[in-house]
Amino acid sequence: MALTQEEVRHVALLARIALTEEQVATLQTELNGVFDYIDQISKLDLADVEPMVHSIPLVNSMREDVPVPGLDRERALMNAPAREADAILIPRIIGPGADA
Amino acid sequence: MAVAANPQDLMFKPATEISRLVCAREVSAREVVDAAYAHADACDAQVHAYNQRSDALAYAAADELDKKLAAGDKPGDGLPDSALVGAPVAFKDNMNLQGTRTTCSSRILSNYESAYDCTAVRRLLDAGTLPLGKLNMDEFAFGSSTENSAFGPTHNPWDLARVPGGSSGGSAAAVAAGLAPITLGSDTGGSIRQPGACCGVVALKPTYGRVSRYGCVAFASSLDQIGPFARTVRDAALALQVISGKDRYDATSVEAPVPDYSQALGADLKGLRVAVATDFLELEGLDPEVKADVLDAAERLTRMGAEVGEATLPSTQYGLAAYYIVGPAEASGNLARFDGIRYGLRAQDATDVLDLYMRSRAEGFGPETIRRVMIGTYVLSAGYYDAYYARAQKARTVIKQDFDRVFADYDLILTPTAPTPAFKLGEKTTDPLSMYLSDVFTIPVNLAGNTALHLPTKLSAAGLPLGVQLIGNYFDEANVFRAASALEQDYQFPYQTVPVNVLGA
């Protein structure tokens, strides 16, 4: 099964990555090459095989319910691209039409 | 002081020997840091292992240690009870350490200041080691050559025209070049062992859960594991000893007690059962010298008293396909956090929030990161989950069953680590799949979750490091170290002859 350029654009939207038309074309070729290889997994007989979600058998990992200090505010904010007082500043996310 | 007068002489000693000299006050911790940076000044312009040196942290730790030593403190008495006190170390740039940036060699994090400490980093430093800096890598650990770094590639100290492997290429090259005797890397599909093979250093991926992943920027959470690089098996074992164990900040770290790994070193091999994975040796494209080296290692193990047999792991041939579903799928989720909002690069003049996300990520991510996120997003998208992710999870089960079957009869599995010695820069950058195949022998271990170590053996006819992979059962790092230690003594790999060495003279 080969990905079309339209599918590449759709996946890029889901992945939240803006692609140029040149990138779409390159990725179409590269991803189809990768998927040609990956598709060999369909040859494995996996009937009645349980999926492995985790390699080590673990039960719920609980700790004592004792409060400990978390990340302090200044350190949480120090990498913000823009900030105002104790908050991260972001561009408006609701369009002008919603102002009223 | 004579020993510090030649930085290179000091820096090619094992961490345990540097620690002994420091604790005996034959050389000061400050002189160790001086030597480490003097050697880096001499050769890192060629190698480019460092992304960032942490001079202030290194000298602060060194001066505090020197003060305590001057006051009469000793390891276990006023100082950490460790044979690594005073040894310099460095970290892959995906591990947080306050006072350094953690960039993952990505534009999107190029200015990111660590807000807290990675547990494995903290534990190694709490053992009295000195933090030299952060090391180059493939962006977000996506790659097998360190050419995917946004800050330029690292070069192999054995041949500057060749790659150091990846993704932990900076960590491997730093140890090979004598920049640090111990470094930490992370291994999701071979990212510790394959660069260990390219650069000719001891490189261990611990059992999943042995070492906390807290503070290491996540690639694929069900596969990632932090582990050490070193030039001696003893240094690697001591480093693992220190970083292992349960961590309250990583629920997948296990409670299992951490054995004294040094007990396994130098132990004889009588009764140790080793399987040569014969199907691994039939892979198309396997370098004949690499294959011969594995068979030679098997003979040496036999001569030293191990019971060597043969086994096959037929399902592992699907490992690479399963990995390129599971790895990118988990990565696409983990990398969703890089959206330009709370930290990292933010695109300017966005028209709306979707535009902000999409352009921040497009500007911040390199080509391989975009490929992986695209693969992962696709296999998880509506209608494809069963064909890909669900199948890959089942493939992990049958691969684990292959290992379980062999480990019912054997303690260790002997295989190549990488199909070829280090390849040339640029050789595989235009063909993603050929790059992915570099990890064909290492990936099955991540999928199953057990442990494996790369051990350097000798140099190829072309002067490049050769070596073998020793695969152990779950939490059986001790037997891996036992065999590695015996082979290490038998081979005497010529670390000091690394050509980049002469640049520091």
Image (cartoon, coloured by chain):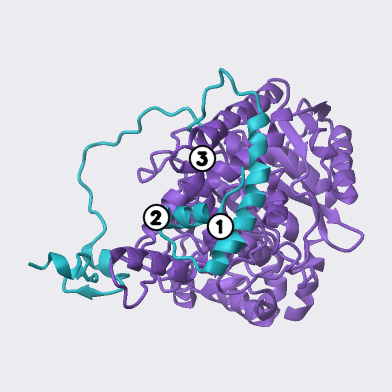
> Quick one: quadrant of the C terminus of chain B?
bottom right
Where residue A29 appears, x then y in whole percent?
64, 57
Q: Which chain is cyan?
A: A
- Mark 3 or 2 closer to N-term? 3
Amino acid bearing label 1? Arg
Same subunit, tags 3 and 2: yes
Where residue A78 appears, x then y in whole percent?
29, 70
Where residue B347 appears, x then y in whole percent?
37, 73
Q: Nearer the viewer, mark 3 or mark 2?
A: 2
Q: Residue at x 43, y 65 (%)?
A: B361
Residue B504 placement, left or right of B134: right
Q: Chain of mark 1?
A: B
Residue A99 placement, left or right of B241: left
Shade of chain B as shown in the rendered figure: purple
Name the disc covering residue B336, or none.
Answer: 2
Q: How many marks?
A: 3
